[in-house]
Image: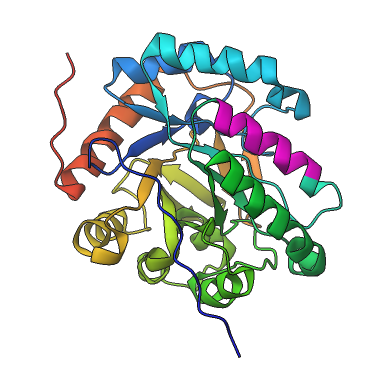
């Protein structure tokens, strides 16, 4: 008999409003203080730091020390930017995942995050995943975090491939500190035959966070576009977030990895050079306008 899933404990929104963050992914190659100053200049209020192998410059666990956390928290305060969510994707079923992800969770909490997003696990790592997720959920309680499990985009077989995998997975975990962070921009390359917007909306009742990005599919692969210019159905997803009572408290991040595309085999490929700040700011300012328009929120004008 399947145990009913316990709804995730959703972190409070800012002033009663849904929190809209911007992922650090488009700033790949730019130092964090420059990224935060740039975000402040376009009117962003929150950043989602991105520590994702293959999406960003290489890093190791020394990026998550207490000293680094203090440094990052200071940079956030100096720029006047909040941190509600952090992406730190690993396979939670790999042998070292418990130690590695605990360190990243402590870092996330130290810089103010309430959500930490990660992949679940490759299906072959299922046994270790369920061994690890219980102590990770307990640590999330201690740190006042929630863990968002995200569907991948690389075409592999994961415990969370599409929305239909979510209910049984979360029921088996059975902990209020674990929910979904659904990303329709991953679905298009991970399971190309699945309708992206419909699958995202099917997952939303189990989400505590979601990523918004748009993708254009070509014979050469998958390319990330301005919101509304790809095939994902971002407007439809945002409309669903706005109108569905079950997703009223779901926070979101705009994630546009401008230095990255996926090949026809769905594997990520980074450009040799970082994207100029002016190009990033133009793309993200337009994305903020798109999101706020479709969520029916009022965006302050930025000079």
**Spot occupied by residue 52 in the image (x, y as percentages of width and height):** 64, 38
Check the image and name the residue furthest to the top.
78
* Tally of marks: 0
Instruction: Report the side of 175 relative to 129 (left or right).
Output: left
For the residue pair 163 and 95, the one nearer the viewer reads as 95
For the residue pair 44 and 281, the one nearer the viewer reads as 44
For the residue pair 274 and 73, the one nearer the viewer reads as 73
Instruction: Report the side of 38 relative to 238 (left or right).
Output: right
- Is residue 121 placed above or below 22 in the rendered structure? below
The colour style of the image is: rainbow
**Spot occupied by residue 276 in the image (x, y as percentages of width and height):** 46, 17
- Is residue 128 placed above or below 116 in the rendered structure? below
- Is residue 50 placed above or below 128 in the rendered structure? above
Instruction: Report the side of 65 relative to 202 (left or right).
Output: right
Check the image and name the residue furthest to the bottom.
1
**Spot occupied by residue 110 in the image (x, y as percentages of width and height):** 57, 26
**Spot occupied by residue 303 in the image (x, y as percentages of width and height):** 17, 13
Is residue 60 something one can see in this rendering? no
**Secondary structure that dominates the magenta span:** helix
Highlighted range, magenta: 99-110
User: Is 102 inside the magenta-drawn segment?
Assistant: yes
- The quadrant in which the N terminus is found is bottom right
Is residue 5 something one can see in this rendering? yes
Check the image and name the residue furthest to the front.
142
Indicate the quadrant where residue 78 lies. Answer: top left
Indicate the quadrant where residue 233 lies. Answer: bottom left
Which residue is at a point 67% across and 35% down the rendered structure image? 104
């Amino acid at each position: 008999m399947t145990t009913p899933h316990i709804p995730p404990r959703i972190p409070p929104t800012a002033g009663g409003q849904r929190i809209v963050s911007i992922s650090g992914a488009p700033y790949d190659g730019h130092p964090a203080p420059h990224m935060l100053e740039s975000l402040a200049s376009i009117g962003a209020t929150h950043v989602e730091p991105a520590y994702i192998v293959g999406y960003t410059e290489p890093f190791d666990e020394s990026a998550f020390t207490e000293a680094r956390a203090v440094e990052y928290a200071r940079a956030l305060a100096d720029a006047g930017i909040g941190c509600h969510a952090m992406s730190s994707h690993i396979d939670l079923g790999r042998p070292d995942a418990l130690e590695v992800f605990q360190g990243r969770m402590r870092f996330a909490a130290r810089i103010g995050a309430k959500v930490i997003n990660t992949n679940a696990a490759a299906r072959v790592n299922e046994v270790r995943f369920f061994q690890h997720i219980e102590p990770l959920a307990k640590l999330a309680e201690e740190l006042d975090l929630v863990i968002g499990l995200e569907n991948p985009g690389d075409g592999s077989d994961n415990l969370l491939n599409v929305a239909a995998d979510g209910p049984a997975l979360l029921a088996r975990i059975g902990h209020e500190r674990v929910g979904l962070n659904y990303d329709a921009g991953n679905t298009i390359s991970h399971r190309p035959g699945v309708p992206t917007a419909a699958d995202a909306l099917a997952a939303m009742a189990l989400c505590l966070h979601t990523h918004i990005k748009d993708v254009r599919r070509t014979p050469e692969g998958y390319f990330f576009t301005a919101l509304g210019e790809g095939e994902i159905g971002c407007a439809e997803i945002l409309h669903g977030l706005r109108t569905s009572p079950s997703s009223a408290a779901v926070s979101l991040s705009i994630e546009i990895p401008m230095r990255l595309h996926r090949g026809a085999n769905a594997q990520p490929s980074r450009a040799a050079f970082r994207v100029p700040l002016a190009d990033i700011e133009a793309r993200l300012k337009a994305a903020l306008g798109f999101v706020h328009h479709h969520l029916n929120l009022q965006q302050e004008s930025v000079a």
